Image (spheres, coloured by chain):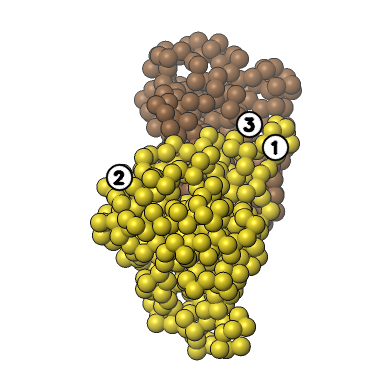
Chain colours: A yellow, B brown
Amino acid sequence: MSERLRTRVAGIELANPVLVASGTFGYGREYGELFPLYRLGGIVTKGTTLRPRAGNPPPRLAETPAGMLNAIGLQNPGVDHFIENDLPYLRQSGTRIIVNVAGHSLEEYQAVASRLAGEEGIAALEVNISCPNVAQGGMTFGTDPTEAARVIAAVKEVAGQPVIAKLTPNVTDIVAIARAVEGAGADAISLINTLLGMEVDIERRRPLLANVFGGLSGPAIRPVALRMVWQVVGAVGLPVIGLGGIATWQDALAFILAGASAVQVGTAIFMDPEAPLKIIEGLDRYLEAHRESVTNLVGAARPEHPAQ
Amino acid sequence: MPMLETATVVGQTRVARDTYRMELAAAGIAAASCPGQFVMVQAGHEGARLRRPLSLHRFDAGRVELLYRVVGSGTRWLAGLAPGEQLELLGPLGRGFPLHPDRPAVLVGGGIGGAPLVALAEARGRAEVPTLVLLGARQAAELVAVDRFRDLGCRVEVATDDGSAGRHGLVTQWLPEAMADFGEEAVIYGCGPQGMLRALMTLDPRFTVYLSLEERMACGVGACLGCAVAAADGGYLRVCRDGPVFAREEVRL
């Protein structure tokens, strides 16, 4: 992998700026059958809670114009099962592992982070204060600056790794939340999680998703995500990981130019499992042709950037 | 082990109302497939849509056949592909049908659900044990694969909701009668709409029953947890990875 793709976020060195987003890649095993995982900049795991969670009843998915809705409901085997069964596999994958930490209470977030604190092979925690598909916790923390700060501070207290706060776009003022988590000691911010939406099944005359509401992802949300990344980069001093609808290398580059130090690819993987690899290759070709590097281009579209 | 493979369309035929059979050159997937498995099929240009899970209708010597019904924009795009055009497949995926070649079998297909049962009948072969195929559809124009099953030496019975072909009504209504000659060693395989599968769940417990399920999918490989089905012992199973074929004792429908 070429030097020009290297980047740094939350104190972690990444071989390239393309991570796979939480919830779209499980714990890596399934896609590890299709391509070598070391080619990725990193893997953000499925949201992991203290105890196993069954998730929401089906239907959990709906395709929408240029995107999809999901209401999985944080189905996961719990942190102990993860440490025993999935982490050993991820450790030998040859890429950076970021564990997405979820919970329904402050104590749960803290307990998950504590269990992970002493574990080798975890580069960072991404704290999910933005899941729209659970009744308690998740997004309810991420929509209030005080609550968001409390969760991040609680996790920071016990965490053994850098802490990334993952923000929800379902707020009036994303900047207020970003400032709050910065104040609470977050090492980086990732945004955006999904936009809350719904679909109606006109044949059955009912909401299509059993959960009624779901999270909208995919290219449909990209301009919203890009706008919020722009706002947050302008308002805080923390490194930002951009995500939301990134499907091509051009999309990824736009987020980097807007100020993201790295990006995550999610829904695009369902449309093309090799999308993250194609994005990395596309970025590399662009950087080579322009004799540039990722780090040089972070924020290069911003008026305050020296290149402007 | 699943693989990503660029397949070339070698044939595309309309075989029933809104129903097409597409033949694809895809040597890797064809060689690795088992009956009851499926593929995630590219359903638009350059990652514009989620891939569509389609069961393997047949596979042999470097080719796979997909039998599918046009129900939305993705399958309409597929139906517009001409021989020579290419598309990406991911597969073979999931857990297929246990074959039980030494036991008599009843294959119950509702609508397009008949598609994967052809691969099953082919793999079981022209054994000495009888294979009965019951196919249901809303109307005669939507029946699929009847001749294919007959060519394989299966006894085929047909039912339609409107009586336009075969018996009038649902296949499951006269399943007990059609199965009168089958003892408890019989294996029943079902693929079709939810109502049909539910009826198969309630068959006499002495029969072995396997059901192939359908659910909306995003990844197809077991990562996204989108295609959940309620497990008999609580929680959820993944239709794409733990299925799509389940023994009836494993799931709640």
Q: Who comes first in sequence, dot 1 or dot 2?
A: 2
- The residue carrying pointer 2 sits among few (fewer than 14), some (14 to 19) or many (20 or more) residues within 10 Å by Cα, namely some
Q: Nearer the viewer, residue A145 or A113?
A: A145
The amino acid pointed to by label 2 is: Asp
Which numbered disc covers residue A248?
none
**Which of the two discs, 1 and 3, sits closer to the camera?**
1
Which numbered disc covers residue A201?
1
Q: Residue at x 46, y 13 (%)?
A: B204
Q: Residue at x 42, y 64 (%)?
A: A185
Q: Secondary structure at mark 3?
A: helix
The amino acid pointed to by label 3 is: Gly
Q: Nearer the viewer, residue B24 or A181?
A: A181
The residue tagged 3 is: B111
Position of A187 relative to A4 (above/below): above
Q: Is residue A13 visible?
A: yes
> Measured from the top left, where is residue B225 in percent x and y?
48, 44
Could you tell me which chain the residue with mark 1 belongs to? A
Could you tell me which chain the residue with mark 2 belongs to? A
Q: Residue at x 61, y 88 (%)?
A: A308
> Measured from the top left, where is residue B22 in percent x and y?
61, 48
> Measured from the top left, where is residue B40 in percent x and y?
53, 50
- Co-location on one chain, circles 1 and 3: no
The amino acid pointed to by label 1 is: Asp
- The residue carrying pointer 3 sits among few (fewer than 14), some (14 to 19) or many (20 or more) residues within 10 Å by Cα, namely some
The residue tagged 2 is: A80
> Measured from the top left, where is residue B32 in percent x and y?
41, 49
Q: Secondary structure at mark 1?
A: strand
